[in-house]
Every structure is written in structure tokens, then in C-alpha cells.
Amino acid sequence: MTPQNQLAFVIAIKEGDHDALQKVLDQIAIDPAGNTIFPFAASTTTHFARWVVIPGTEEGHYLLVFSSNFDGQSRRKHLEEWFSVNESGFDTILSHCVGYDTGATTQKKVRLLQTKFKSPAAFYIGTRGHSLEDIDRDFKLRDFIRDFVDTQNFKVGEEKQLIDAVKQKVKDSEFNWAMKSSSYPLGYRIKKFFQKWYDFIRLGLIAIIVAIGLAGLVGVPLLFQLGVHAAWLIGWSVLTIWCYYLLLTLRKKEKTDGVSHERISIERAHALGAVEDIYLQNQMTHLVTIKPGQFRAVLSRLALWGIYVLAKHVFNKGTLGGIPSIHFARWVIVDKRLLFFSNFDASWMNYLGDFIDKASLGLTAAWSSTMGFPKTRFLAFGGATMADRFKRWARNLQIPTQVWYSAYPNYSVENINNNAKIRQGLSASLNTDKKRKEWLARL
């Protein structure tokens, strides 16, 4: 199994170069995989990628964003791989950006872009552990097994014999690599183990501190009656006052913050719709300003960090809160704005509908501190449950993606993960009728 990561860098576009850069990106967008300027298919580790132009914080200024999801752990190595196969493409595009010198050495160019890296506030992987090579091989393996099974005459009750025949057929074929079990590298597994406990301990401590603080209204008077040392009572009282102050501040802001009633223009809606539903997969780039003040800034980062921890350690089996259609998604904070990238299956309406029906709490928590978001209650309630308002808000703040690339635009998350389970079943002990029937049903 292969670890995956993400890369995003943001760089300012030279004043007056926006239109010229747009023409270059338009040329690339005609054929993202195989164009002559920046052929994304030249990378053997990139699952999804995009070039996006977003408005800067000053009127008339623009920023260029490059984003990718890739096999491996090192963002620097991924960027170096890109330069090794397509430095001229970077030069053509980034010559329109501030500080990029096309005459500099490759190492200097990479170092410059490293200073522009943006770490995600939250990041989700729907096909975790499956490399680009694995995905392609697993589809071919499934077709090979299905073709073989279709030629067999085994009856109901003979599942074991059929599976034994399948394993022997695979073992004797070019697909014999599939008979070996796979796992993450040992170093990565150790790192992941300690990271999981570190993240959950921090998340648990925050939850415990808040719970103790809120319980202080009952606990402090009770301990006072029992004659507990004054220092403990004072400390708990301070924590309780602080927790309720934060809670009341949040509720006050939630009641008084404005919401957006703006509707997207027909022209812009048509422009966004023109590049959607071409493949099984779709993409979304969304940009919204975080509400002013340190309170909202900290709250937004904290909520997104909680989502990140859950996405990394709990929702890591192909579904995010019950949603099985997201390949990769991430939130990135840029200049006090929240930038959201998503690569998903099916239509935009179905995608947001799944979010509303299955993961409204997390969705509301992620965006409750952003401008114009529908009214929320206690950070995670309300908000996205107001379906029409939420969809209108989301569509109105969606940014056109100038160039979007998928290495497998017609493969779904469920197909990819299902194919991987077929492969894994070849090296597993399918020692019960239930397990054997479940594995055959995947074909």
C-alpha cells in the first residue's frame, strides 16, 4: 500500500499578466492530460491536479494556485518530480507570476515554490493507500477474474472450489503479483500509529477540558460544600467562567452574524455548468472569507483540525461521514479566506445533497465561521441543514477551475475500493461461507 499526500502552492500573478496567463491555461484545459504546454499525464504519481486563478485581497490583483493529490509523502519530492518531467511547462505558466525567474536553476525554482506551500487545515482521502499504478492494475485484475468466472460451471454451495480455481488461475497468470498481501511501509505504519494517539490525546484533552468547564456550574458548588481546597475551587471556577464566556460569545455571534441572500448570475452558473458532468467525476473549487475577528479565526482552525483528525483516523475506509463519493478533498486557509478543493463522483447537486443528508454536522462546523453561511447553532447545528440556502450559498461562492486533471476520470471511489478488496481477498483466508459469498459478490 502506498501513502498519499497533497500539494498546494499559491503565488501572486504579475500585475497586467492575468489575461495572458488565462490564455495559456485555456490552451491547457482543452486537453489537460496530453497538451504540449503542461501535460499532467507526464506524472506517474499524480491522481488529481488543478490550476486555479483566485482574486487577491486587493482589487485587480490575482493569485495562481496549483494543487495536486499524489502518491508518496514528500511534497518537495513530488514537486521535484514534476520539474523533472515538465520544467518548461512550469516556466511557461509561472513566468506570469511574481518572483519566478525562468533563468534560475531548478533547485532555486523548487525552493521558491516551497516558500509558497500551503498546508491543509483539513484533508480527506477516499481511496487511501491505493497508488495510481494499483488502481489501474486492480481494474485489469477484476476484469480478468470476472472473465474467468464467467466460463466456469460451479453451482451454489461450491463457492470454495470456485475461489480456489480463481486463485490458481491468477497464480498461473501475469497477475500473480496479486497473490501477495500488501501493507504500508513499516516506518509509515509506526509514524501513523504514534500520530493517531497524539491526535486523539489532544482532541480528547480539549473535549475533557470543555466538559469539565461546563460541568462546573454543578461541580463547584458541590465541592465547596465538601470543603475542597480553595485553589481547586478557584481554578475550576475560572475554567467554568471561561467556557461559558466562549459559549455565550459564540451564540451571540451566531445570532447577529449576517447571512447571504445573494443569487448567482445566470451567466456564471452556465460557465460553471459547462465544465461539469463531462465525466463520471466532477470537481469543485470554493472560496469564502472567514468572518472577522480572532475568535472566528481560531474557531475555524479548531473545527477544521477536528475534521482533519477524524478524516485521517476514523473516516479512512472510503467514506466521509457516510459519503462514499469523495476521492480527495481539502480546506486551505489563504489570506483569511477558506479555499476548498474537492474531487468527487456524480453531479454537483448529488454531492451537496449527500453532504446535507449524511454529514451536515461536519459540513456546518467547517464553514460556520465564514461569511454569509446560513445560520448555525452551537457551531455544528443548523447551517447546511437548510438545504436550499446552503446550496445557493455554495454555488454563489464557487470559483471556476481553469484547469482540472484526473488520471482516471471515469473511475468511482466505490469501484476503486471494491477492486482493491477483490485483490486483497486473493491473499486472505476466506474461511467461512459468508466471507466467500461476500468476495464473489464484489465481482
Image (tube, helix red, strand yellow):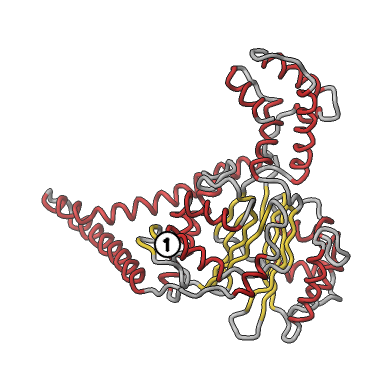
Residue 350 % position (x, y): 57, 53
Residue at the image point whose x is 78% and y is 33% from the top: 143
| Horizontal side, residue 70 vs residue 348: left or right | right
Q: Is residue 195 visible?
A: no
| In this view, 197 is above or below 306 | above
Residue at the image point whose x is 74% and y is 66% from the top: 403
Residue at the image point whose x is 76% and y is 30% from the top: 178
Q: Residue furthest left?
A: 225
Image label count: 1
Q: Nearer the viewer, residue 225 or 315?
A: 315
| Horizontal side, residue 234 vs residue 335: left or right | left
Q: Nearer the viewer, residue 312 or 290?
A: 290
Residue 379 % position (x, y): 39, 61
| In this view, 432 is above or below 206 | above
Q: Residue furthest right?
A: 36
Tell me the quadrant of the picture where the C terminus can be found: top right
| In this view, 251 is above or below 189 | below
Label 1 element class: helix
Label 1 crowd bin: few (<14), some (14–19), many (20+), radius 10 Å: many
Q: Write down the quadrant of residue 430 in the picture.
A: top right
| Horizontal side, residue 233 vs residue 54: left or right | left
Q: Write down the quadrant of residue 99 in the picture.
A: bottom right
Q: Is residue 109 visible?
A: yes
Residue assigned mark 1 = 383
Residue 212 % position (x, y): 29, 52
Q: Residue furthest front?
A: 266
Tell me the quadrant of the picture where the N terminus can be found: top right
Give the residue type at disc 1: Gly
Residue 311 % position (x, y): 54, 49
Q: Write down the quadrant of residue 172 in the picture.
A: top right
